[in-house]
Amino acid sequence: MAYAIIVGGGKIGYYLARSLINNDYEVLLMEKSAAQYRSLSADLGDVVMQGDGCDPLTLKKAGIERADLLVAATGDDPDNLIVSQMAAHCFGRTRIIARINNPDNGELFEHLGVHERISGTTAILNLIGQKVSRAPVVLLGALERSNIEAVELILNEGSPLIGAQLSEINLPKDTLIISVLREGHAMLPNAGMVFEKDDVLIALIPPELESALREFIV
């Protein structure tokens, strides 16, 4: 079982932790704020740890030396950079994903060797740059220098997914559905979920599968 450490217990860290747990990861979610830690641990239990991810001793206590993945997901770019640098240079971790809140900091992260990055602002700009019409597959953003991108699948009328269970659908290989938005509410998918018209699916795919996924949805 792969082990993932997520630093930052905001909404992004929380939902990412839930999604990874749902996909059979061993997860540790680290949060510095005592109040936020109590709230998260009441929901997620022992997978939550209180501590500062910028502290190497705290990372060591969290088991960073055996982690397969570290995600720096705080709302502070300097903190995310420090966490990423320590994971790479102090503990030899190679799979590190950093959240960038200010896209202007992307060049700095790149220069310092943090090649896999997610920026919410960039994702929104990608959406703005696309057609306003509800295309069935919309690119939300990509992890830089990686083989993963996030896409939005909109189940318009006539979609072959409407009325089908997730377990019945033969999606293109390596496509992972991580969330389903229905009537404004986000849900974690399960094998028995039946898709409905106007559902919005959030999926992770390798970039080369985007065209195949578009053909499948249409």
Image (cartoon, grey):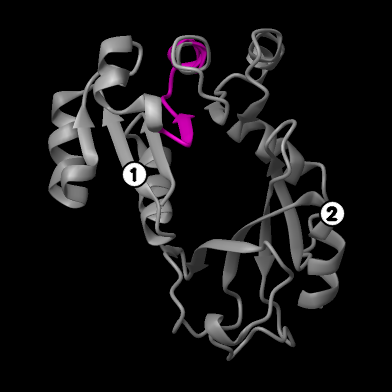
Q: Which amino acid type is marked by label 1?
A: Val
Asked whether residue 181 is in view, the answer is: yes
Q: Quadrant of residue 117?
A: top right
- Judging from the image, what secondary structure is the residue with disc 1 in? strand
Q: Amino acid at mark 2?
A: Glu
Q: Residue at coordinates 21% horizontally, 32% vertically from top-left?
A: 49
Mark 2 secondary-structure assignment? helix
**Dot 2: within a 10 Å radius of its alpha carbon, few (fewer than 14), some, or many (20 or more) residues?**
few
How many numbered discs, if any? 2
Question: Is residue 76 a member of the stretch shown in magenta?
Answer: yes
Q: Quadrant of residue 152?
A: bottom right
Q: Position of residue 218 (x, y in %)?
A: 82, 78
Left or right of 61: which side holds 117?
A: right
Residue visible at 39% across and 31% down?
66
> Circle 1 is placed at which residue position?
27
Up-down: is 95 above or below 164? above
Residue segment shown in magenta = 67-85
Please state the horizontal and vertical placement of residue 94, each as a whole percent of the image: 57, 26
Question: Going from the N terminus, do you reach mark 2 or mark 1 first?
Answer: 1
Which mark identifies residue 135? none
Q: Is residue 146 magenta?
A: no
Discs 2, 1 touching: Cβ within 8 Å: no
Mark 2 lies on residue: 208
